[in-house]
Image: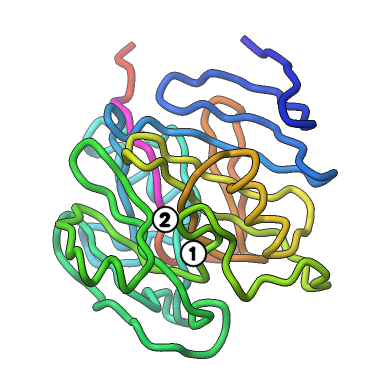
Amino acid sequence: MIRAFVTAGAVLWAAQAGAVTCEKVTHDDKRYTVCEVDAATEDMRLFLNGDDGALLGHFSSVNEALATNGERLVFAMNAGMYHDDRSPVGHYVEEGQEQMRVISNPGPGNFGLLPNGVFCIREGRADVFETLDFVDQAPACRFATQSGPMLVIDGALHPRFLEDSTSRYIRNGVGTSADGTRVVFAISEDAVTFHEFGRLFRDMLGTPNALFLDGNISRMYERASNRSDIGFSLGPIVGVVEDTPSN
């Protein structure tokens, strides 16, 4: 069922897809698709390589791998920056096994625009941590991916974001509620600045912490709407998984 409503000056079109609720959102005249996940009840995972060690890289490849266990994707999105060989630039954990350590020092590019952060999936919750806070707390993540910069930090925009910036790209990111049960993914349908994207999470989506996942290469999968953005191979992918219904 599709419904329309108006909130905080933005028009939303929402569709309930069981495990994931996705909405078409307009905020400050920029269009986004926003998908919300209940981390307390849904099966959210990160994907990089298959059982044979080969890069998955595409939503279709993740679905093929899941099908062997009678599962499928409900929703997915690229989930962090990667090197040319698609290995993660920063911290990466899959099924409790660390594949890449935490990078806490400044560096080039968006990833090194500190503060950056870590998206951590645990039993019954998921959280965006600022990287140094993540190191201090050392949470036991079942899955984790590091990216940057942070978009929102304890309710405040990243201090380096400029309101008059002219750097615009298609961007995607993730924000979490304080109790870790509400996870909100967003991808822009128009090219946006960091300041505009951060305001979406802070002012409209109401997430106290949010993390930039990537820009320009941003892609999304949503089963309910038959959306599956295609392109060259991705690195880490985050997805919500469900059992494939029996016939």
Residue 131 x/y as whole percent: 35, 71
**Amino acid marked by disc 2:** Ile
Q: Residue 50: x percent and y percent?
A: 27, 58
Callout 2 secondary element: strand
Residue sitting nearer the eye, 11 or 47: 11
Residue count near mark 1 (Cα–Cα under 10 Å), binned few <14, some 14–19, many ≥20: many
Magenta span: helix, strand or loop, mainly? strand
Question: Do tag 1 and tag 2 residues touch (Cβ < 8 Å)?
Answer: yes
Kindly identify which numbered label has been placed on residue 237. Answer: 2
Q: Is residue 71 magenta?
A: no
**Relative to residue 192, is residue 41 drawn left or right?**
left
Q: Mark 1 — residue? A: 234
Residue 200 percent across, percent down from the top left: 66, 47
The magenta segment: 238-243
Instruction: Indicate which disc residue 104 carries.
Output: none
Query: Relative to 110, is 16 above or below?
Result: above
Q: Quadrant of the C terminus?
A: top left
Could you tell whether 133 is left or right of 59 in the image? left
Q: CA distance from mark 1 to mark 2?
A: 7 Å
Picture residue at 40% right of the left edge, 25% below the top: 19
195 shown above or below 208: below
Q: Secondary structure at mark 1?
A: loop
Kind of residue sitting beneath label 1: Leu
* Residue under the point 36% across and 76% down: 90
Residue shown at the point (46%, 28%) measured from the top left: 20
| Badge count | 2
Q: Measuring 59% from the left and 47% from the top, which residue is drawn there?
A: 201
In the shown orientation, is residue 203 left or right of residue 63? right
**Side of 162 relative to 208 (left or right):** right
